[in-house]
Image (spheres, rainbow, N blue to C red):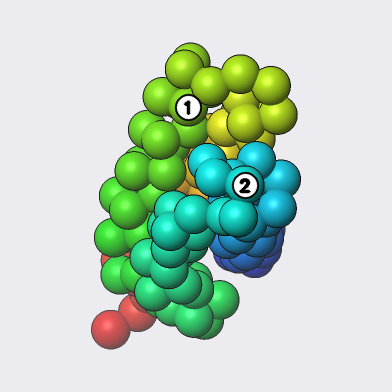
Amino acid sequence: MLSTLRIGAGISLIALIFLCLAWESVLAPLKPQGSLLILKALPLLLPLFGILKGRRYTYQWAGMLILLYFTEGVVRAWSDTGISSQLALLEIALSLIFFLCAIFYAKLVRNSDLKAPA
């Protein structure tokens, strides 16, 4: 179960990084040449190694960070049209997958730490 949650969180985080980069550079940038909104992928790189290594604390704070991307996805799905709206729906899905994997991973790791012999 823990390995499934780690894999789900890792894959969804990496997919969200690539989605942000592709969205703002090629697929549907705000300006035809691309925009500085591509920099929104940088904060997602901060928890990447901690997530891949299974660090519980990283899962906890990254779960809160990902809610910013969920919020952006909701706003842009509501306000944008065309492919940008569809990409926003994908951003919502990926951020929800990551959030759920992260909170359940952190909970299960805590519970397994409490049951470990001292």
Q: Which of 83 and 44 is in front in this view?
A: 83
Give residue 76's mark.
1
User: CA gap, disc 1 to disc 2?
Assistant: 18 Å
Residue found 39% across the figure and 74% down from its top:
46
Q: In terms of depth relative to the viewer, which is nearer, 81 or 94?
A: 81
Residue denoted by label 2:
32
Residue in front for this viewpoint, 3 or 8: 8
Q: In this view, does 44 lie to the left or right of 115?
A: right
Question: Is residue 1 positioned above or below 115 on the image?
Answer: above
The x, y position of residue 115, in whole percent, is 36, 66
Q: Where is residue 45 in the image (x, y as percent from the top left)?
A: 46, 72
Can you tell which quarter of the image residue 22 is in? bottom right
Going 42% across and 43% down the picture, which residue do you hit?
69
Hey, what amino acid is under mark 2? Pro
Amino acid residing under circle 1:
Arg
Which residue: 43% across, 58% down?
Answer: 36
- Comparing labels 1 and 2, the label whose residue is closer to the camera: 2
Query: On the rendered image, what quadrant is the C terminus found in?
Result: bottom left
SS for callout 1: helix
Residue visible at 48% across and 15% down in the picture: 78
| 17 on left or right of 41 | right
Query: How many residues crowd mark 1 within 10 Å: few (<14), some (14–19), many (20+)?
Result: some
Q: In which quarter of the image is residue 12?
A: bottom right
Q: Judging from the image, what secondary structure is the residue with disc 2 in?
A: loop
The numbered mark, 1 or 2, whose residue comes first in the sequence reads 2
Quadrant placement of the N terminus: bottom right
Q: Say whether marks 1 and 2 touch (CB < 8 Å).
A: no
> How far across and how far down the image is residue 72, in percent?
41, 35
| Relative image position of residue 33 (x, y in whole percent) | 60, 55
Q: Is residue 87 visible?
A: yes
Q: Residue furthest front?
A: 32
